[in-house]
Amino acid sequence: MHNKSTIKILLVDDEPDIIEFLSYNLRKEGFEVLSCNNGKDAIEIAKKELPQLIVLDVMMPNIDGIETCRELREIKGLNNVLITFLTARSEDYTQIAGFDVGADDYITKPIKPRVFISRIKALLRRLNLDNKETNGTVFGDIKIDLEKHSVTKGNIEINLPKKEFKLFVLLSSKPGKVFTREYILDHVWGDEVVVGDRTIDVHIRKLREKIGDDYFKTVKGVGYKFDF
């Protein structure tokens, strides 16, 4: 498990007030905070400091957040760093562009400090999950056993057919991350011929019925994510 004090967060925004506001709230929670005001410096700092999480503004002069994210993902050693976009723009196309270049999440500003910290902690939970045994993952009272190909909630085993199980394992592999519909089709169905665009929706609906409605979130125009 990661200790908060070892977690380094890089904030990138060209508005000093936002950097100051977010830095203050993150430091109050015990995180180590680095900051800069442009994409070029962000790439240099990230290469040197190897933060676990980068909070990246989309609208910046010269290199914008989308291009910065794309470049970060191409650097060895940084392709697995968590990246969340921070932006005042909430249009679907901006979100899709962000997820296409490898963003893990999307935070729209203005945002209340409590909500911001909660989103950051949800993202950082993935670092802890990565350290768990590879054959089983636990989310509250839900346990996924990859070897036995089973899911239990409390003491009750939930019967999931092969595709529902694969979809659940994929979404829960990175809680809070939005998986695009294309990515899901590619990784769950692969080369199989899928009839109709509703296939994923039907499987998500079945997972909601069996595991719980609150765990599976629809991100309009993009895809789905698992939250717990």
Image (cartoon, grey):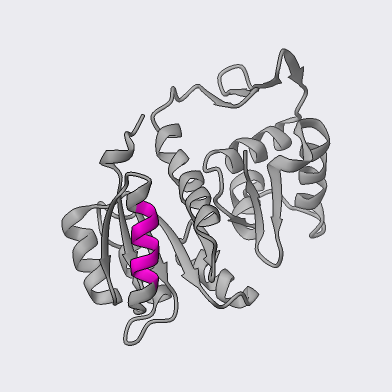
Q: Is residue 181 above or below residue 190?
A: below
Q: Is residue 65 above or below residue 106?
A: below
* Nearer-the-camera pick, 71 or 46: 46
Residue name at image x 33 percent, y 34 percent: 2
- As drawn, the residue found furthest toward the left would be 48
Q: Position of residue 33 (x, y in %)?
A: 28, 55
* Nearer-the-camera pick, 188 or 72: 72
Q: Relative to residue 191, is residue 164 drawn left or right?
A: right
Q: Quadrant of residue 10?
A: bottom left
- As drawn, the residue found furthest toward the top would be 155
Q: Relative to residue 140, is residue 153 drawn left or right?
A: right
The quarter in which the C terminus is drawn is top right
Q: Relative to residue 186, is residue 160 drawn left or right?
A: right
The quarter in which the N terminus is drawn is top left
Report if residue 140 lies within the magenta region. Answer: no
Report if residue 23 lies within the magenta region. Answer: yes
The magenta segment is: 18-26
- As drawn, the residue found furthest toward the bottom would be 62
Residue name at image x 71 percent, y 64 percent: 220
The answer to whether residue 185 is seen in the rendering is: yes
Q: Position of residue 130 (x, y in %)?
A: 41, 34
Residue name at image x 19 percent, y 67 percent: 44
Q: Position of residue 208 (x, y in %)?
A: 79, 39
